[in-house]
Structure formats: C-alpha cells, structure tokens
Image (spheres, grey):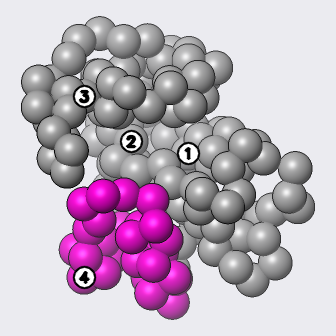
Amino acid sequence: MTDIHVRRMTPDDADAVSVLEKRCFSVPWSRASFWEEASQKDACYLVALAGEEIIGYAGVWILGTEGHISNVAVDPAHRGQGIGSALLENLIRAMKERGAASATLEMRVSNDAARKLYEKYGFKSVGIRPKYYTAPVEDADILWNTKI
C-alpha cells in the first residue's frame, strides 16, 4: 500500500479535488459546487494524500443519527492500494464522533469494486433507484449500514 495520510479537506484542496473528480466520474461536480457542498457545517470531507498529492477524497453529510456518504473517490492510478478503505474508516470515525449510528449511500449497480469495499464495512443493499445515474444511464444500489 502507498504510504498515505488522511486529513480534513480545506479550501486550498478544492482545485486538486476538482481535478480528481474529473478523473473519477463521468459527470463531475464543478469546483464551485464541490466546495459549496464540502464547506457546509453538517458535511465532513476528507482527502487522502501521498506526500503532497491528493489521491483520493470522501465526503459525508451527518444529519442527526444518520450519515449520508456522498462521495468516495480514488485516483485510478492509485486504486487497489487500500486508499478507499482508509477514507471510509476515517469517515465512519467522523460519523460516530458526531453521533451518527447508521450510514447510507448510493452506488452504480455495476461498480463491483465499490460494492466489495462497502460490504467489507457492513453495508447491505436495501433497494434500487432506477436510472439514478447519467452518462451512462444506470440504476443506483441503495446501501445501508445500520450499526456503524
């Protein structure tokens, strides 16, 4: 595994995260939309760094006792090295610290790597959101972990 460090995202990270967003998603958020989301008081966004390079990020909204994971992304060149696990572990810790007892997320039904990651941390499929994603159009699998 690459030697990585996970920390809270700061405004100075927005440009690098925006570039990473474009590498990871077919319909990326804009830099402005991303930072508007990440800077909200109920949100917690983290970055994973290899040295000074941002190679992953993850975000969650924590509302009451529930966390809604909005993003987990790892640079394609760094996948398969445990970075997604490190980000998810840190998100779960942040959710617990803020009083969340459960967490949910949506993922493309075809994303087997993400499914394996989330199942490793106790997430289970509870339903489908038809045609949730665009470019390409695809259903979302709704996952919950009721005991984070």
Q: CA distance from mark 3 to mark 2?
A: 14 Å
Q: Earlier in the sequence, mark 3 or mark 2?
A: 2
Element assignment for label 4: helix
For the residue pair 12 and 97, the one nearer the viewer reads as 12
Q: Is residue 71 magenta?
A: no
Is residue 47 something one can see in this rendering? yes
Task: Please give the residue where the numbered disc 3 appears in the rendered image.
Answer: 140
Q: Earlier in the sequence, mark 3 or mark 4?
A: 4
Q: Hey, what amino acid is under mark 2?
A: Ile
Q: CA distance from mark 3 to mark 1?
A: 21 Å
Horizontal relation, residue 35 to residue 77: left or right:
left
Q: Earlier in the sequence, mark 1 or mark 4?
A: 4
Q: Earlier in the sequence, mark 2 or mark 1?
A: 2
Task: Answer few, some or many: residues within 10 Å of disc 2's Cα (few below 14, many 20 plus, some between 14 and 19).
Answer: many
Task: Please give the residue where the numbered disc 4 appears in the rendered image.
Answer: 32
Farthest residue toward the left? Answer: 131
Task: Please give the residue where the numbered disc 1 appears in the rendered image.
Answer: 91
Figure quadrant of the C terminus? top right
- Whether 135 is drawn above or below 93: the answer is below
- Whether 112 is drawn above or below 57: the answer is above
User: What are the residue bounds of the magenta stretch?
Assistant: 12-40
Q: CA distance from mark 4 to mark 2?
A: 19 Å
- Contact (Cβ within 8 Å) of mark 2 with mark 1: yes
- Contact (Cβ within 8 Å) of mark 3 with mark 1: no
